[in-house]
Image (tube, helix red, strand yellow):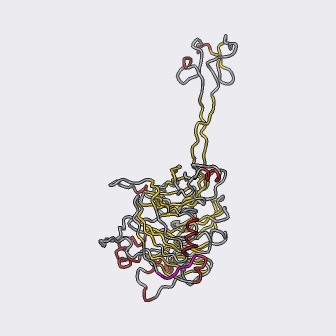
């Protein structure tokens, strides 16, 4: 559905119709029975601000870049496109661009600690002069990369007479004897009776330097290290284009892109006595418009943005697992800067920064797993960190689940959209039943707190089989301007459009 179609649906029905998602592309698809190497599993996905480039990071420390191709097929004026009846509703298509090794495994000898090369987060920075810039981080070190096209210059077209060449040595006349050479100042040598013929030697010419091809070169411009005692869980660019933040379990640091040897600690939740530690920082994000505002989430399920947003649990419903499943694994600002999307283990929540009483919408994702929390705790699945994302128009949100499934929910006025898709070439679409209570658009959500329940049978087939906890879709990203989602299932990158 195009943006114009979506607006028409809003005007006529009051809410956009559920999107019909279709498979677009897959990169790195494995064949049946193929064993996936641990280093090839995708661990980060990020679109740039224009949506023309997509970056992925993997557990092997590599960053792979893709570029959009469907917008380059025809670069003419829009009037020319109309005359040609050129289709304007084409969905985004991408191709492989380049890849580079961002991080290597390291060892901290002072702490006797191995540092994995796995890429935790990727964030795009502002491009300049045709070059792409991005930040990537593992557990301890952040790197600032510049990716630019470089013309490779080669010496060619020597135009020498091969019959006069002697191996790889200088070109000389066969009649010249080395025993009769006289050396001159610049390292050359001539015979005593040597003289240049009129017009010079036709078989000897100066070499020609030409640019034969253009290669993409990735160069690390800055390394920001030794500022975190605990594992870095998130990085976020500031809207000023000059600074960024990095967060670990207990601290958030502010950096300038041009200064790698100094950072400023702006949030510190480490208590004087570590035995008094009750919560940790799980994610941090800069406001998309206000450079002096940021939000960070905690393991207690709270989000702090000057004031604190926290939903109070009913004391009678608390259990051993309450704090674990309430821990927020990811937060994202909406483009309007007023709403924040958060993901904990069980739910997806939408918050209004002007309301601190609780989320304005709650989408059930893993409610059907509540009876199995003991099993999830024993196999460590309860600690899985699922990411979330919002559409560019703010009308929908998405997050991943088990069995390589991901959910798309509508959050506009009157929307009952709750779609389940499987990361495969033939996604199985399942519609979840949502609450019949009327919903409000993002602009009017501040006056109501609502709960939207998804399908309780997510991950359970008709035979009652439960979710496959060995296949999980943790990472996904929504294109900033199109209804297109990129998601990672193990080592494969799947892309869908609507």
Q: How many marks?
A: 0
Q: Quadrant of residue 210?
A: top right
Q: Position of residue 400 (x, y in %)?
A: 45, 68
Q: Where 135 sits versus 211, above or below?
A: below
Q: Is residue 227 above or below residue 37?
A: below
Magenta span: predominant SS is loop
For the record, the magenta segment spans 436-442
Identify the residue shown where x is 60% and y is 23%.
Answer: 159
Residue 330 visible in this rendered orientation of the protein: no
Compare residues 48 and 101 and report the one nearer the observer: 48
In the displayed structure, does residue 477 sit left or right of residue 155?
A: left
- 495 lies above or below 444: above
Q: Nearer the viewer, residue 445 or 321?
A: 445
Picture coordinates of residue 342 (x, y %)? 52, 73
Q: Nearer the viewer, residue 11 or 276?
A: 11
Q: In this rendered view, identify the residue nearer to me: 177 or 160.
A: 160
- Asked if residue 260 shows in the view, the reply is yes
Determine the residue positioned at 68% across, 14% down.
196
Residue 74: image location, x then y, percent: 59, 49
Position in image of residue 319 (x %, y %): 41, 83
């Amino acid at each position: 559905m195009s943006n114009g179609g979506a607006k028409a649906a809003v005007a006529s029905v009051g809410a956009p119709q559920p999107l019909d998602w279709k498979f677009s592309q897959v990169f790195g698809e494995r064949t049946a029975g193929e064993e996936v190497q641990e280093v090839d599993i995708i661990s980060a996905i990020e679109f740039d601000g224009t949506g023309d480039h997509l970056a992925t990071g993997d557990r092997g420390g590599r960053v792979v870049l893709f570029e959009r191709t469907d917008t380059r097929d025809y670069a003419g004026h829009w009037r020319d496109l109309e005359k040609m009846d050129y289709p304007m509703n084409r969905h985004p298509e991408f191709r492989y661009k380049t890849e580079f090794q961002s991080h290597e495994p390291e060892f901290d000898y002072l702490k006797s600690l191995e540092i994995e090369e796995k890429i935790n987060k990727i964030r795009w920075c502002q491009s300049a002069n045709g070059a792409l810039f991005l930040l990537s981080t593992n557990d301890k070190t952040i790197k600032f990369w510049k990716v630019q096209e470089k013309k490779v210059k080669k010496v060619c077209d020597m135009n020498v007479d091969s019959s006069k060449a002697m191996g790889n040595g200088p070109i000389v006349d066969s009649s010249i004897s080395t025993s009769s050479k006289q050396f001159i100042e610049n390292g050359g040598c001539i015979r005593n009776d040597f003289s240049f013929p009129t017009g010079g030697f036709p078989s000897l010419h100066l070499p020609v330097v030409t640019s034969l091809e253009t290669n993409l070169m990735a160069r690390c411009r800055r390394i920001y290290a030794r500022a975190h005692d605990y594992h870095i869980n998130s990085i976020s660019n500031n809207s000023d284009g000059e600074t960024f933040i990095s967060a670990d379990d207990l601290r958030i640091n502010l950096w300038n892109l041009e200064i790698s040897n100094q950072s400023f600690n702006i949030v510190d939740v480490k208590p004087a006595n570590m035995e008094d530690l009750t919560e940790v920082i799980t994610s941090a994000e800069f406001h998309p418009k206000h450079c002096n505002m940021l939000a960070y989430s905690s393991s207690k399920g709270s989000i702090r943005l000057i004031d604190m947003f926290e939903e109070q649990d009913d004391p009678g419903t608390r259990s051993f697992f309450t704090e674990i499943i309430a821990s927020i694994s990811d937060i994202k600002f909406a483009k309007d800067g007023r709403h924040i999307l958060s993901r904990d283990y069980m739910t997806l929540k939408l918050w209004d920064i002007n309301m601190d009483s609780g989320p304005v919408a709650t989408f059930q994702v893993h409610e059907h797993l509540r009876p199995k929390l003991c099993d999830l705790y024993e196999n460590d699945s309860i600690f899985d960190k699922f990411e979330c994302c919002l559409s560019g128009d703010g009308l929908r949100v998405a997050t991943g689940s088990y069995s390589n499934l991901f959910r798309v929910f509508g959050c506009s006025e009157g929307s009952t959209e709750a779609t389940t898709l499987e990361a495969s070439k033939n996604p199985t679409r399942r519609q979840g039943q949502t609450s019949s209570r009327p919903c409000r658009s993002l602009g009017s959500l501040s006056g109501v707190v609502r709960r939207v329940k998804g399908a309780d049978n997510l991950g359970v087939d008709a035979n009652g089989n439960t979710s496959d906890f060995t296949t999980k879709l943790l990472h996904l990203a929504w294109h900033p301007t199109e209804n297109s989602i990129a998601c990672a299932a193990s080592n494969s990158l799947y892309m869908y459009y609507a």
